[in-house]
Amino acid sequence: MADSSHDAHEDKPVLPEPENGDVWGMMGMFDTPADLYHACEELRDAGYKGLDAMTPFPVHGLEKALGLSPTRLPFFVLAGGATGLTGGVLLTWYCNWDYPLNIAGKVPFSWQVYIPIYFELTVLFSALTCFFVTWGLCKLPTFFHPTMRHKSFPRSTDDGFFVTIDATDPKYDADDTRRLLEKLGAKEVQEVHS
Amino acid sequence: MSAEKHPPKGDGLLPRDLAASWTKIGYGLGVVGVIAFLAGMFGADQARFGAAYLVGFMFTTTIALGALFFVVIQHLARAGWSVGPRRIMEWLSQGLVASAVLFVPLVILAPKVWHHWMGEHAKHDSILIKKTAYLNDTFFYIRAIVFLLTWALLAIWFYKTSREQDTSGDRTLSEKLQMAAAPSVAALGLTTTFAGFDWVMSLDPHWYSTIFGVYIFAGCLLSSHAMLSLIIVRFRRDNIGGSLLTVEHQHDVGKYLFAWVIFWAYIGFAQFMLIFYANIPEETVWFRHRWEHGWYVVSLMLFLGHFVAPFLMLISRTAKRDPKLLALSAALLLFVHWVDLYWLVMPNFDEHFHFQWVDIAGLLAPVGVTAAWLAKRVLADPAYPLKDPYIPEAIKAENL
């Protein structure tokens, strides 16, 4: 990536700071995934809870360094799949009960032949649940986020590795947090407003 | 990214007490196996013992064959993560050498086991007359020799070459194995399919199913991964293999095990569904035998124990990473794999479901001999590859 493009977004802030916005949190930038990873581990060990990171590509194991709890997504998907399976059984049973047809001499409600339908409905409901709940858990679509106010934030899709600390974190303190981030080697530490 | 990982140090040998106790178990099973064989061969109905022995023979052979498949597939894909598990599978695949010997009693019992098409009356059966070009004694034994030799030689060669690398660390050995893997996987696929046709499907020679070989293949991979899971759990308790057999590798093997559970159910259902739906008497009769006179319970047990229960047990990430849950699922799968083979073979001999002591004898004989042979052959060797060029990649394995 040519250096001129970095200079271009460093020159102009993405969004102006609001006049009286609440403090949303503190952001810091690192140059390499390894620096970010170690900084996240230090912050986690220092007791910070409201941590998040933005990187241009997935950094393996970062969720452990951030101390994030495992996702709840599998339980939603399991519930979705179970709904699909139950729905499939009820659908085929109801059709055979309401309007029995003699097909290939099978007894009404020959469940064996409907297994592909049960399978497909289970997969369909699981997949759709997975898709929509992922959007929900990620709070998508989000058209504005306070992190966008950081003047180098576009670099998070190129070569910048960001860590953010939420202001709602009880340990959050504008001066202490800034000092800790700078000590860990963060560049362009900036407090952003919502 | 997290803590630095190092390849395990040392000569890779099993701890002395573990090797000693496993040797004792192996030889003990061997003695039990020989006694069981003699008791079954001379103290029971030979047709029944032949059938029970065939079930046991298929049990040990499918485990070893699935292990050989695993080894070959890892080389074919140049897989890096599986260096540690691969050695255990190389060990299990040595069972194919024992299988080549264990086939001899089946040759003696053959006229009683495959009596539907081997006997005199087959010459007057209009359906079997059309099949004699394939189903005749001479060609059957030639095929059996080809299958057993192919498997034994491949198992020996893949293991021998891997062991050479333990001392030389020569990278070209890996490349040689990778080159050989593609034709080997083709050879294994064909021999497994036709062995399934010859040894199990031909017990009911009027009946046929083109997917039958794949069904046997699914059982091979499922049972060998179940055995692998059990050994990995045991090794990890003593930290054998260190960074080559971490919880991440165990998790990967658990995912494989879960996948083969689904694969088995998929193939088994594919076979059932077409026959059920078409409803042609000459095809449905095979399932009818397994649906009447008490076999219904075994069929149902297979559906619940071979698919539903292990599916629910292994679906969660936690279960695959938990040694106890994984070992429990693997033990269940090994048991139902035997039930599965029993269900394939025995209804051809007994219209009513009767469990007999000789069925256990037929299982113990091949299992005992194979266990004793493995104890003698592999337990003094390193339990993980020492100088494989993929070790640096293997120790990095991680599940997101």
Image: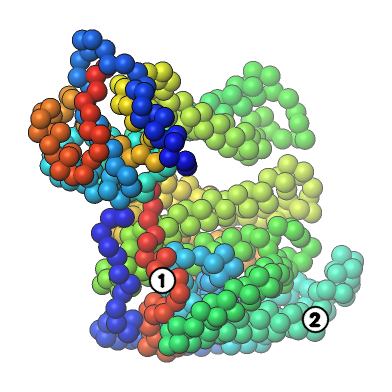
Q: Is residue B114 in sight in this rendering?
A: yes
| Identity of the residue drawn at 31% across and 16% down | A16
Q: Position of residue B73 (x, y in %)?
A: 57, 67
Vertical arrangement, residue B208 with respect to residue B31, above or below: above
The amino acid sitting under disc 1 is: Ile
B347 with respect to B394 (left or right):
right
User: Dot 1 corresponds to which residue?
Assistant: B391
Report the quarter where the C terminus of chain A lies: top left
Chain bearing tag 1 is B
Residue drawn at point x = 39 percent, y = 77 percent: B384
Residue at position x 70%, y 84% from top?
B145
SS label for mark 1: helix
- Corner quadrant of residue B228: bottom left
In this view, the mark in front (2 or 1): 1
Q: Secondary structure at mark 2?
A: helix
Depth order, front residue of A146/B18: A146
- Same chain? Circles 2 and 1: yes
Amino acid found under the numbered disc labelled 2 = Phe
- State which chain disc 2 sits on: B
Relative to A9, residue B381 above or below: below
In the displayed structure, does residue A98 sit left or right of residue A144? right
Q: In the rendered structure, find residue B139 and report the number of the disc placed on it.
A: 2
